[in-house]
Amino acid sequence: MIYWLYARHLARQITVLPEQICIMVDEKDLREAPDKLYDCVTWSVEMGIKGVIFHISTKDPSSMDPLLPAIRRISSIAALTLHCGVHEEQSGKGIAVTVAVGKSGREEITACIRAMAEEHIAPEAVDESVFERYLTFHYTPDLMIKTGGDHLTDFLIWQSVYSELFFSDVNWKFLRKVDFLRALRDYQSRVRRFGA
């Protein structure tokens, strides 16, 4: 009862929401609590967030195959885009949720450069807008959340340059709605400068 009241109290304090959030999870964490993805999407829907991106850090995306049913469950409450290795699938309706398994920001940038070279884009014609057309992920998350106190990965290194970062000491499998709400409350307390 007290937990429920506290969560409600926290939610009422949040008046400025990020439109899009990115939550970073490593392979070990996901194995321990795969259903936590669904929980985070549920909380995001309840709060009115417009988009959620999950990055699952793994060197072998195929090792995540047993967890795909838990990931696909998200499509019952949201529009899910799943990137796993070279495979991509879309399903469901609702807020936009992307799950990127084993994706690397460095690889994404390398692929952009290769694609521009293959299309014979002149070097002098390359600016930020041209480069961004070649990105795999066209998101600019307002808030990046990393659980367990670990370091960030290189996912979305171009797109997240102006994102706010939130590091939670709470491990992924123990993450509760109040911990999620604390990240949102922390976000609203910041003055975003967008590099200025």
Image: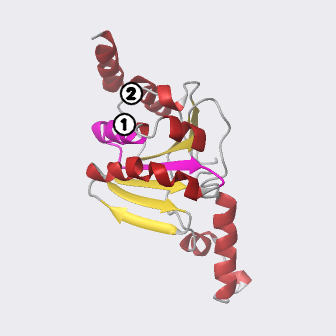
Residue at 65% from the left image edge and 81% from the top image edge = 116
Residue at 56% from the left image edge and 46% from the top image edge = 163
User: Residue lying furthest front in this view?
Assistant: 66
User: Residue lying furthest right in this view?
Assistant: 123
Counting from the top left corner in percent of width and height, residue 140 is at 51, 54
The vertical placement of 87 against 21, above or below, is below
* Magenta extent: 37-59
Q: Quadrant of residue 37?
A: top left
On the question of residue 89 being in view, the answer is yes
Mark 2 burial class by Cα count in 10 Å: few <14, some 14-19, many 20+: many
**Is 135 included in the stretch rendered in magenta?**
no
Amino acid identity at mark 1: Asp
| Side (left or right) of 191 relative to 109 | left
- On the image, numbered disc 2 is attached to which residue? 177
Counting from the top left corner in percent of width and height, residue 124 is at 72, 82
Q: Quadrant of residue 117?
A: bottom right
Counting from the top left corner in percent of width and height, residue 58 is at 62, 50
Q: Secondary structure at mark 2?
A: helix
Quadrant of the image containing the N terminus: top left
Mark 1 burial class by Cα count in 10 Å: few <14, some 14-19, many 20+: some
**Is 46 included in the stretch rendered in magenta?**
yes
Q: How many marks?
A: 2
Q: First in sequence, mark 2 or 1: give its number.
A: 1
- On the image, numbered disc 1 is attached to which residue? 39
Residue 175 or 196: which is nearer the viewer? 175
Amino acid identity at mark 2: Lys
Residue at 36% from the left image edge and 64% from the top image edge = 90
